[in-house]
Image (spheres, rainbow, N blue to C red):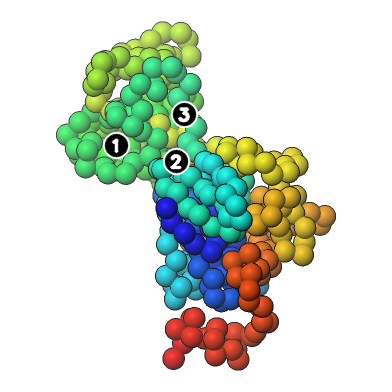
Amino acid sequence: MIKTEAVIIGAGPTGLFCAHQLGIIGLKCEIIDNLDKIGGQCIELYPDKPIYDIPAVPECTGEELTNNLIEQIKPFNFNFHLSDRVEEIKRENDQWSLKTSKGKEFLTPNIIIAGGVGSFEPRKFPVKSAETFENKCLFYSVKDKSIFKDKSVCIFGGGDSALDWAIELSKTSKVTLVHRRDEFRGAQSSVDKAMQLSKEKKIEICTHFQLSNLKGNEQLESIEIKHDDGKTKEIKTDYVLGFFGLIMQLGPILNWGLNVDKKTIPVNTENFETNQKGIFAIGDLCSYPGKLKLILSGFHEGALAARGAFKYARPDEKLRFEFTTTSKAVQERLNIK
Ligand SMILES: Cc1cc2nc3c(=O)[nH]c(=O)nc-3n(C[C@H](O)[C@H](O)[C@H](O)COP(=O)(O)OP(=O)(O)OC[C@H]3O[C@@H](n4cnc5c(N)ncnc54)[C@H](O)[C@@H]3O)c2cc1C
């Protein structure tokens, strides 16, 4: 059981800056995210795209913004719990207990939900037999590419991930790239490269096909793909990879007894508390009159939620307003010598 003064759900830009604000006022927190990396939408959806409306930063990419936010909270040494989803929250006296999908438990007086548009999950094959092989021979992301060495791999999808992995794995594996259309949606340079590799017989490309069945017992033996015209084709393969993009699921957040309005959580604008004492919602997930779904709004909301959390974490202390420029206490927390 991890005891802390606040748990932040979501390591997107809002959750990260809120962690900074908690650190500045001297509170400890733990940060949980369903993704395997820090940065939320900025890192998952547009790491290379420039953002032009971060105050005092004329231009930075999603990845640069994330790296700077991570750098800014380094002095506080907060723990991140990645690839883990908060499933359950329960009131225990004046604390909240949280349970995650990996079985971790937290006890805290404050939960700050910075869950954005929900947790990102891969869009999956709509084929029943796919579930049997999931995470054994069928994957929706690549964690360790060495397992595919000298094996047969069927890659499904028409976007950048499918093309990039087909190109990469063709160096060490027998790759078949299957797409339900003729046109690929990825970067033109990747499409050209895949076509070149197909001409050189280093990748086999099957278009107008979709997965219709997987065969095997413990180990996958072959798959069946179905053409638009109804004809099927069997391919012997060791692994299947599916890259169909991500869907966002509010998922468990909807079951936590919070008021929900059109997939957002209404909050007050004084401290961004929800209808539950000690539970705050900030960033894209919260709603109030005039809400702008922008990163800069999330920063402001995080600053006020952090201060709202103080009274539950330290009921006997009074929070003093201090500037970072002049406060010795704040500068000590930031390790400024
Ligand atoms: C293409 C694109 C371009 C954009 N450009 C701009 C721009 O120029 N300027 C701007 O200000 N904004 C822009 N935005 C919007 C901006 O990215 C969002 O406003 C911002 O990311 C919201 O931050 P957040 O931290 O609230 O949520 P998110 O970034 O969505 O992060 C939420 C995190 O919470 C995690 N999570 C959710 N539920 C759980 C759970 N139960 N357990 C564990 N983790 C969970 C998710 O995995 C996710 O990582 C853009 C968005 C897109 C898609």
Three-letter residue code for mark 3: Lys
Element type at mark 1: helix
Q: Toward the viewer: 226 or 263?
A: 263
Element type at mark 2: loop
Three-letter residue code for mark 1: Leu
The crowd level at tag 1 (other Cα within 10 Å; few <14, some 14-19, many 20+) is: some
Residue 101, numbered label: 2
- First in sequence: mark 3 or mark 1? 3
Question: What residue did someone put label 1 on?
Answer: 197
Q: In this view, does 137 lie above or below 42?
A: above
Residue 118 in the image: x percent, y percent? 59, 44
Residue 288 sits in which quadrant?
A: bottom right
**Residue located at (40% from left, 35% from top):** 140
Question: What residue did someone put label 3 on?
Answer: 124
Kindly indicate whether the residue at mark 1 contacts the one at mark 2 (C-beta within 8 angstroms).
no
Element type at mark 3: loop
Q: Which of marks 3 and 2 is in front?
A: 2
